[in-house]
Image (spheres, grey):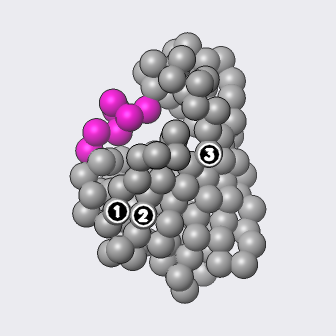
Amino acid sequence: MSLTNIVQRGWDALGAGDFDGLVTDYIEEMIFIMPGQTDVLKGRRAFREALNSLGTILPPGFEITGLRNIEGDNEVVSIVEWKSSKITASQLSVLFRFDGDKIYEEHWFIDTEQWKSAF
């Protein structure tokens, strides 16, 4: 299975609310770097627990309106088009780094000022 397919499977699991299925593609010692670049979750358990609060992490009315994945050597970048109650259209990117067929790092890149204004 390609790395792009693994990332897409994760986006599909996220959309379906299958958080337990989502985290199976991550190594135990993974890191998740959130918007603002200063908040880091370490470990699959912490990441899975954070997913329970997804409704408070994402802006009200958050919706993915488009998704493209670009695969490189041991990494995939997702370009995510999104909107929310206060933002009519925007994009963000997410870098997924792999060790074999498992994700060891997920790093979100967002216009943090716009993201804050979406709440």
Residue 7 x/y as whole percent: 57, 64
Start-end of magenta stretch? 52-58
Report if residue 75 lies within the magenta region. Answer: no
**Residue 117, picture quadrant:** top right
Indicate whether 12 appears above or below 55: below
- Determine whether, in the image, residue 15 is placed left or right of residue 47: right
Disc 2 vs disc 1: Cβ atoms closer than 8 Å? Answer: yes
Label 2 belongs to which residue? 31
Indicate whether 37 appears above or below 47: above
- Determine whether, in the image, residue 14 is placed left or right of residue 90: left
Residue 31 x/y as whole percent: 42, 64
- Asked which secondary structure carries label 1, the reply is strand
Indicate whether 25 appears above or below 113: below
Indicate which disc residue 109 carries. Answer: 3
Looking at the rendered structure, the kind of residue marked 3 is: Phe
Disc 2 versus disc 1: distance between alpha carbons? 5 Å
Indicate which disc residue 42 carries. Answer: 1
Report if residue 53 lies within the magenta region. Answer: yes
- For mark 1, does the 10 Å Cα neighbourhood hold few (<14), some (14 to 19), or many (20 or more) residues? some
Looking at the rendered structure, the kind of residue marked 2 is: Ile
Looking at the rendered structure, the kind of residue marked 1 is: Lys
